[in-house]
Every structure is written in structure tokens, then in C-alpha cells.
Image: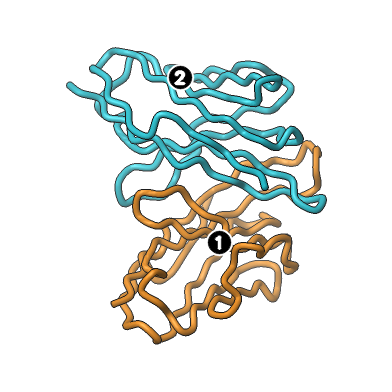
Chain colours: A cyan, B orange
């Protein structure tokens, strides 16, 4: 079946450095790739997403890049701040029986060290 | 704009008891999802509705879990009887998308605050 692999599982960076999280998907029909941020005890929040017709999207300090040929997409956070510390999930809508369902990655725990 | 509402926020039950969760999606959202999130893991889709029909329930343990969305708006998820391994956060989410493949419909999912279930 469809799956989404996410790496790394944990990531520690110094404040001000960049962080990169990568996801690989299996369903070539996937055409929407969101990233969620989940702080401890809170709900996942959509932080950025990309459609399959573009290769990169930026929103201030965060960006997402997509490589459809290689079937992977990445989250880039620049100038990291302590408040960026959270668990980040990627997701990809797999296609099943003519409809789609979201498959989430296993998550990346990001720690930004002050 | 009002977000996705869920209740209760917390529930503690003993194994073999039953429990029900309620979700009210964002107004106008056709698609509703129930996820189970075990501590330290990503959300796992249990069931997906499009309006009042089930789109996918392949990962729903149907011997103990049931869900309905009778009028195509709010939804309930029930567990009967509960097991220890059901301890998790149950997240409800909604989106505008109507589930068709390769459409330009909005795919963005919005999550509710979740219900933290503890089974003892």
C-alpha cells in the first residue's frame, strides 16, 4: 500500500541555524503535500503546503520543495527560533479506489537550542 | 471563523467499557476524518466521510469501533468495548475537498483539539 517515510526522527539545531526534514512518498498520483506542526498536547497545525504543479513554495522562514521525479518533498526552516521546537509531520494523500486518504509520516521532533 | 469542535476533551474509562466522541466540522466542509494518534506517532486515519457516506474505513477496527455522520455534518465515533491499546488522542479533522482524484478542490485539513482517551 501507499506509505510516507519521514527523516530524521529527531533533529537538534542551534538557534539561528537551518533545519531540513525530508519525506518520501510512494503514490505517484499524489498531488498535494502539506506539512503540519504539532506542539506538545496540541492539535496539528498546517504550516505550509504545496501542489504538484510547483516545485517550491516559501512563507517567511519556512519553505517546501517538491521533487516529483524522485517522489520526495522537504520542509526547510531558516533562522530557527526556540518556538520552532515541536514535532513536524508531512502527509500525502494516497489514492485508493478512486478517492484519496491522507497518510502521515512518522514525525520529526525538532529541538532548537538557545 | 469557527474551527473544528470536539468533545469531550478528556476521558478516562476502564477496559471493556464503552465511550463516544463527538465532532462538529467547519461549516461547509464536506469531508470529515477521524484519526487515532498514539503517543509519539503520527495520526492514523480511522475513517473518512464525504458528506454522510464513508469514503474509507479500511483501518477502523470494526469489531469494536463504529462511526456515523448521519446528516452529513457532525459525527460520532464510538468504541465498545475499549481495550488498553485504545489509549490515544482521537483527532477529528475536516476539509472542503470532495474526494475526487486530481481535482482542484481544496485539500487543506483543519484539526480539532482532540479527545485524549485513557483506558485503565
Q: Is residue B46 above or below residue B120?
A: above
A96 sits to left or right of B34: right
Which sits in the foreground, B10 or A70? A70
Which sits in the foreground, A45 or B19? B19
Given the image, what chain letter belongs to the residue carrying mark 1?
B
The residue under the point 32% across, 83% down is: B14
- The Cα atoms of the two marked residues, 2 and 1, are separated by 29 Å
Which sits in the foreground, B85 or A112? B85
Q: Is residue B40 above or below residue B57?
A: above
- What percent of the width, then of the height, locates residue A89? 46, 38
Q: Residues within 10 Å of mark 1 (few under 14, many from 20)?
A: many
The residue under the point 66% across, 21% down is: A70
Secondary element at image label 2: strand
Where does label 1 land, which residue? B34
Q: Which label sits on residue A76?
A: 2
The residue under the point 41% across, 49% down is: B41
- What percent of the width, then of the height, locates residue B92? 52, 59
The residue under the point 66% across, 65% down is: B57
Secondary element at image label 1: strand
Given the image, what chain letter belongs to the residue carrying mark 2?
A
Q: Quadrant of residue B7?
A: bottom left
Amino acid at each position: 500500500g501507499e506509505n510516507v517515510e519521514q527523516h530524521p526522527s529527531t533533529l537538534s539545531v542551534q538557534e539561528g541555524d537551518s533545519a531540513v526534514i525530508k519525506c518520501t512518498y510512494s503514490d505517484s498520483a499524489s498531488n498535494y503535500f502539506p506539512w503540519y506542526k504539532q506542539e506538545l498536547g496540541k492539535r496539528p497545525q498546517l504550516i505550509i503546503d504545496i501542489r504538484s504543479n510547483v516545485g517550491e513554495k516559501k512563507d517567511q522562514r519556512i519553505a517546501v520543495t517538491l521533487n516529483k521525479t524522485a517522489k520526495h518533498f522537504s520542509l526547510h526552516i531558516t533562522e530557527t527560533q526556540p518556538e520552532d521546537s515541536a514535532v513536524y509531520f508531512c502527509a500525502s494523500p494516497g489514492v485508493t479506489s478512486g478517492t484519496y486518504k491522507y497518510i502521515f509520516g512518522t514525525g520529526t521532533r525538532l529541538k532548537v537550542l538557545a | 471563523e469557527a474551527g473544528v469542535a470536539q468533545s469531550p476533551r478528556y476521558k478516562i474509562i476502564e477496559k471493556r467499557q464503552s465511550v463516544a466522541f463527538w465532532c462538529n466540522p467547519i461549516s461547509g466542509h464536506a469531508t470529515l476524518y477521524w484519526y487515532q494518534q498514539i503517543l509519539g506517532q503520527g495520526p492514523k486515519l480511522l475513517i473518512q466521510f464525504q458528506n454522510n457516506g464513508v469514503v474509507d474505513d479500511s483501518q477502523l477496527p470494526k469489531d469494536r469501533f463504529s462511526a456515523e455522520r448521519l446528516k452529513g455534518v457532525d459525527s460520532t465515533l464510538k468504541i465498545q468495548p475499549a481495550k488498553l491499546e485504545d489509549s490515544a488522542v482521537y483527532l477529528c479533522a475536516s476539509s472542503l475537498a470532495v474526494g475526487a482524484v486530481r481535482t482542484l478542490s481544496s485539500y487543506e485539513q483543519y484539526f480539532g483539539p482532540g479527545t485524549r482517551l485513557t483506558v485503565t
